[in-house]
Amino acid sequence: MKKTVLAVSLSLGAVAQAGEVQLADNQSVLEAWAQAGGQPAALVDDARGGTRMEWHNSVSLDAYHTEASGGSLLTPLTTGDYQNLSVSSNFIRQGAGGQTTTGLLGFSVVNDRSVARNNLHIGTLQMSHAQSRSRLVLGDVAASYSSLGVNLGLRGVQMEQKLGQATISGVLGSVAESWETLTGAADATSPRRDVAAVRVEMPVGIEGLRTSASFATHHDNDASLPSQQSTPLTMSGQVGTFGLAWNHARYQVTMEAGHSAWDQSGGASGNDNAMVLDAAWRAEKLSLRTGWHDVGARYASLSGQAQGGVSEAYVAGNWQARDWFTLNTDLRHSENNRVLSQVPVPAVQPASSSDRVMLGAGFQLPRWPGLSLQLSTQASLGENKDGSNNRNHSGSAMFMFTREDWYGNLGSQLSRVDNDAPSASSVNGDITTISAGVGRRWPELAGWMLDLGLNANNQRQSLDNGQHTESQSGSLNLAANHDRAGQVSLNAMKGTVTNPVSGSTLDQTSLQFDYRYPLGRHGQLGLYWRDVSDLAGSSALESTSTTWGLKYAGSF
């Protein structure tokens, strides 16, 4: 007889009576599922000839009041009463032959514009179906095809198919601010970018060697903007890449080359090349890395890892010299040919360059278990675009300890900035930072688990022009947990910062309190309070906000 197994967070097929659990028949379980979920249950054949499905849901309801001052330029919060209903649902269906179907949905209904621009906000929307040699994804997709080509999230459709030893992937979708702007339910503030990309990957003759190629085309759609909004510059283009990756024993080598071409609505156009090469060797206590990256100034891609106009070569290593002593170093030369105002750009400006060296050491003191020390120093020498020089160096030390129920840290960092460029004369000087923290845990104290921490930080900047700025802060963090009484957290911060214009001292304070009471299988009920004051003492910069509310969270 074919069995049916139905697994959900909230059991629909079991009723406890007089201390005895009675299992309902299959049809009763399916009818209860359909009534609770509003749709028939999906059934999945497992290896035993049975059927199995899992469906999980969570919901939270927030009702709170906020009082804010300072204006929209200083804080996104506004005074008012708000509600936020958030729902998350996911299911998984596993069938014979390795077939798997999953679904994810997360949305919120909220009237607080600092949280979402629309009353209905869809956070996650995805449906996928996978077989042994193929996969289809609809909704939110991650197109991680190439560091020089396509590496971003899209809203659309993605497919993957294995043909022999080759894997072919394709994606068609859009880069949009939200699902609401994509569907027209909300006005967009930037053009929608439509993207189509394909990638092929397969092994080649040498053991551990794989090759890949990708191609993508993209187009900015300014029709997605409101008619009354001024249209910014839009861009369309194509980018193609070819790569090799070798991973064998202790060695790893990756190489990728790319070419891009683009056109802007303002009439500008261009094309350029890019190349990256990285190699690594790892032994039990020693690892070495080296690489060379060269991305043309007019290279434009759909990957945040490929910044046009940046070239760099590096050598780095880590050495576990002793069980208690490690060393790491990093040396690199870089050239920056980017123009910050607009990338890509119709013209190429002179490059700036820099050489940097970093050396770090770590100590685990064997005579005092739980004690460690981290030391680091780095220096750089660079040339600005105007031919002037810039020099930076810094050193830091961090001492940390963990002893039974106690923990803490004490650190210091000293840095010096020297830049000969006329525009940078106001930042030359020394920066000193000191930080300290101590805490204690109580695993059992009258049924409570407690964790109390204190932290302090001070930073002072002494500029060569005689100006001095300083910021300092102290914080207290308390977390308590009880099986029956619930969870309590308290975070308090008090600090000051120097106004760089007037030299006056401005105050910063925050106090946050949260309490969560468990309701067993029904979820939990919470109370919270937030009070924040930022840059008090300046009528032009000060902002304040106070929020208190009630929250319910549960899962089924």
Image (cartoon, grey):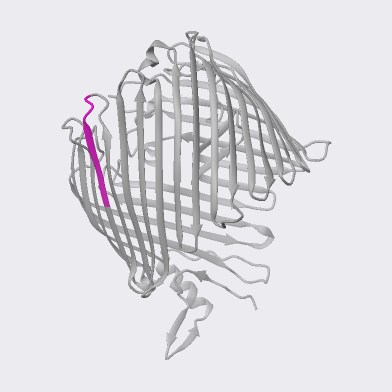
Quadrant where the N terminus sits is bottom right
Residue 274, percent across and down?
A: 62, 21
Q: Which residue shows up at 67% across the image and 28% down it?
A: 291
Quadrant where the C terminus sits is bottom left
Q: Is residue 510 magenta?
A: yes
Q: Could you tell me what secondary structure mostly forms the magenta stretch?
A: strand
Q: Nearer the viewer, residue 395 or 182?
A: 395
Residue 318, percent across and down?
A: 66, 39
Image quadrant assignment for residue 452: bottom left
Residue 35, percent across and down?
A: 41, 69
**Left or right of residue 67, residue 462 in this image:** right
**Left or right of residue 73, residue 270 in this image:** right
| Residue 178 seen in render | no
| Image position of 194 with respect to 486: above or below | above
Residue range corresponding to the magenta coloring: 502-511
| Residue 133 seen in render | yes
Q: Which residue shows up at 52% across the image and 26% down it?
A: 218
Q: Residue furthest left?
A: 539
Residue 191, percent across and down?
A: 40, 27
Q: Nearer the viewer, residue 397 or 85?
A: 397
